[in-house]
Every structure is written in C-alpha cells, then in structure tokens.
Amino acid sequence: MPSTLARALDALRADLPAIAVALSGGLDSMVLLHLAHAWAREQGVALFAFHVHHGLSANAGQWLAHCEQACAALGVTFDHRRVAVAKDGSGIEQAARKQRYLALGEMCRAHGVPLLLTAHHQDDQAETVLLQLMRGSGPAGLSGMDGANRAATLLGDGNTVMARPLLAVSRAELETWARENSVAWVDDESNADPRYARNALRHQVMPALAQAFPGFQQRIARSAAHAQAAQRLLDQLAAQDLAACLDGEALVMARVRPLGKDRIDNLLRYWFGTRGLRMPSTSWLDEMVGQVLDAREDAQLRVTHPECEIRRHRDRLFITPRLPELAGMRDRDDIGVLVKEGQGFVWQGEASIDFPDYGGVLHFDAGAGQGFEAGWLRGRALTIDFRQGGERLKLAANRPSRGLKAHYQSLGVPTWQRERLPLVFAGEDLLFAAGIGMDCHHFGSGPGGLVALRWEPHPAQ
C-alpha cells in the first residue's frame, strides 16, 4: 500500500512545497495520514493535516482531540475549522459536505498548500458509481471520482488540486494495514444510519453484491474508467462544437440546429460547465432544448435555471444572470389602476448619483463636448423612471426622432436589458435613455460648461 500512494503522489508532485491530508479521524483518513507522513518525510515535503468540526455529533469534540493528538505524535502540523451546518434544501448530508470542503479549501489557502489529499478508496468509488446509476446519470456521473482534479466550486478556488491516491485500494486492505501498524481511529455513528442513501447502499446492498459477485468493486472501478474515457471524448466533441457555434458570449442557433438532439444536449452541458453552472437535469434540458428549437424566431424566449436564465435574441442563445426585480419596476395600484412611479431628484453638481431602486449609478460627466448646460441642469426637478411606452428620443439635430424600441433594435440591445435601462426626464421632456443616449432638444452650446449623462449598471450579483 505505501507503494500505491507513492506512485500516485510521485505523479502529482511537480516540486510541491507542501501537501495536506483531509483528516476526519476515521479509518480511511488515519491510514492516509500515516502513509502520507512516511512519504513526506522521505521526500522532504511539508505535511499538514486539516480537520473540520461540524458539531453534528455529540462526539465531534472527541474526534477533534483524537486528530490533534495523532498529529502531535507524528509531528504533523494540524489545523481545524468549526463550521455551522444549515439546511439549504439539499439535505443535511449535502450541506455538511459543502461546508466541509469550503473549510478545507480555506485552510489550504491559509497555509499555502497546493495539494489536498482525501482518503476516498475503491469501495467509495463503487458506492459513488452505484448511486449515480440509481439517479439515472450519464457518462459524467458514472465516471465516478477522478484520481486528481481542481475542484473550484468545492474548495472555493481553482488553484488547489484535490487528489485521491487510495482509489485503487479497498477498505478491507486499509483496515488490515491499520491493524498491522497499530493505527487507531474513531467511528462516526452517522455512518451506520440507513436514512442516508450512501449508508443504505453500503450496509444493505454492497454486502449482497460482495457475496454474489466477489471483487465487484474492482470491476465497477474499471467501468468508471471506461466512462471517464467516453466522457473525455464527449468533452472533446463538445469543445469543437462550442468553438464552431459560439459568437462572443452567445450560441448562434443557425449553427446549433444542424447538430441533432444528442450533440446539442452534449454541447449545452459542456457550455454550462465552462460557465461554472450546476449541471441541469435531463428533463430540464429536454424542455429547454424543445423551447429553443421550436419557438418562433421573434419569440422572447426565457428559460429559468436555478443559477441563471437562458435567453434568445436575434436567433442567438445567451446565458444571463438571474437578476432580482428592481424596486423601480414594481407596479402600484393604490389609485385603482396599475401605474409606474418614478423617483424625483435634483442634481446639485455631484459627479454621480446612485439609484439602487433602478439598479445603477447615473454619472454627470463635466466638460463634455456635447450635452446639457450645467447651469440649466443644476437645481432642475428631474425624474428617473423605467419605460412606460411611447417615448421618443432624438440623438442629433440632423437625425430623426425615433421611438425607444427602434433605437434599441438598431443598437442590438436585447429585450431583457431594455427592461432594466432607466430614463431621465425634466418634467415631461425625455433627456436621457440609458443604452441609447441623450436627447438633443435641450443641448447647450456654451463652451466648457456642458454635462453629459451616462448610466452605469450595478455589477450582477
């Protein structure tokens, strides 16, 4: 077993200054701690051990003490974090996992450790593949766990590598090695709770599989390796399709449609992955692709994803952030009809004014070559509001007055952006439309005293 770990670490080393072990105190991580300690001492590499205290068990304090004492005996630098696990709709097990990895990533950054080792083993790999199979996963899910990867969403950064050097080792082998080398470990009582899907699989299904199909873990691991190879080919195809179909930030639907359903699904999943978005379910993806392909060309398509929105504009598909409704967009019916209410303000010479209800900052750029006279604009009763419909704007004396919709269309401003672009009025006169520009009717001609209006949206959250 030491040679198995040495081969895995030697392949990853690349002059690493330090490595860390994710240490829970259980059998798997305690064996990994001792194996990593021997390797690090031989290689002259600094070794850390990081523990996360979830507080979910009355024994959590004892586990922390056990880990700290074991590291002290070996001379391994130890650190830990206490986290509060709150249910987030995904279940307590998933919420604890999320908090655990974020804490481990934070400790890696705090100590300058580029490589984190976890003690996942062959039985864990088999459990993962079987769970994904029960969920109806495709090749990506059935690939199981990689030997090493960068897990930005788990660890909180894209630089730390997470490695699993014991994936080729069974739990039985780990336990035999621990007993032969007098390694003490703790048992988490929650691992025996069959309410958790992984525990039910581990204690009820896998023993039956082991009896009927001895050595099934190795065969599942081989299947996972085949699925990984298939997924790599699918990713290569998707990367080629994305390069061919992408124009800036959008997919050109005229290039996407000829690919066929399977390649479109593969392309969209890959596109989501490049944007760091949660992978959609098959049913959600089927519904989205159906809407994208079947909707009229001029339809204002919007499909909602938990982390974004998929929109179509001029036969191009965009991934846009899910933005909250702005207070300035809300309707009022306190007088019996639905109306919009703008926000009045007076400019007193500020360089900019923040309008949270309208999602941005209005800038007043002095010394502009074209704009409103500062003296005329200062102290005037102004209003900021969203479109009511029917507004017109004239950009220059030699250009016609046009409706805002025509301006937006000529400038290629997508519909969903128009909804969040405010207007500035002086009384009934439109002075400025964000995304278009200023109306020339009130332009001044005095040299050096002109002010231009400019809108800057708040960054998307």
Image (cartoon, helix red, strand yellow):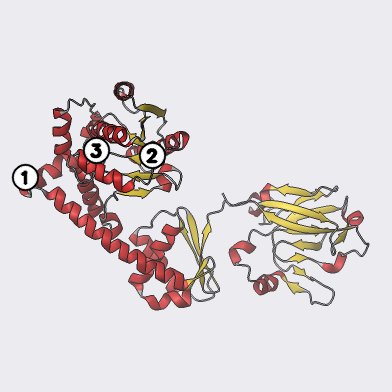
Q: CA distance from mark 1 to mark 2?
A: 34 Å
Question: Earlier along the polypeptide chain: callout 1 or callout 3?
Answer: 3
Residue 117: x and y in percent read 32, 40
Callout 2: 10 Å neighbours few (<14), some, many (20+)? some
Residue 438: x and y in percent read 79, 64
Give the side of residue 358 with respect to residue 91, left or right: right
Q: Nearer the viewer, mark 2 or mark 3?
A: 2
Residue under label 1: 211
Residue 304: x and y in percent read 47, 58
Give the side of residue 372 with respect to residue 125, left or right: right
Question: Earlier along the polypeptide chain: callout 1 or callout 2?
Answer: 2
Q: Residue at x 65, y 73 (%)?
A: 409
Q: Is residue 366 above or below residue 56?
A: below
Give the side of residue 105 with respect to residue 368, left or right: left
User: Which mark is on residue 195?
Assistant: 3
The kind of residue tagged 1 is Gln
Q: Is residue 79 above or below residue 142?
A: above
In the structure shown, which secondary structural element does the residue marked by tag 2 occupy?
Answer: helix
Q: CA distance from mark 1 to mark 3?
A: 23 Å
* Quadrant holding the N terminus: top left
Residue farthest to the right, as pictured = 446
Q: Is any atom of residue 265 visible in this view?
A: no
Callout 3: 10 Å neighbours few (<14), some, many (20+)? few
In the structure shown, which secondary structural element does the residue marked by tag 1 occupy?
Answer: helix
| Contact between labelled residues 3 and 1, with CB atoms less than 8 Å apart | no
The kind of residue tagged 3 is Arg
Residue under label 2: 101
In the structure shown, which secondary structural element does the residue marked by tag 3 occupy?
Answer: loop
Q: Residue at x 14, y 38 (%)?
A: 173
The kind of residue tagged 2 is Tyr
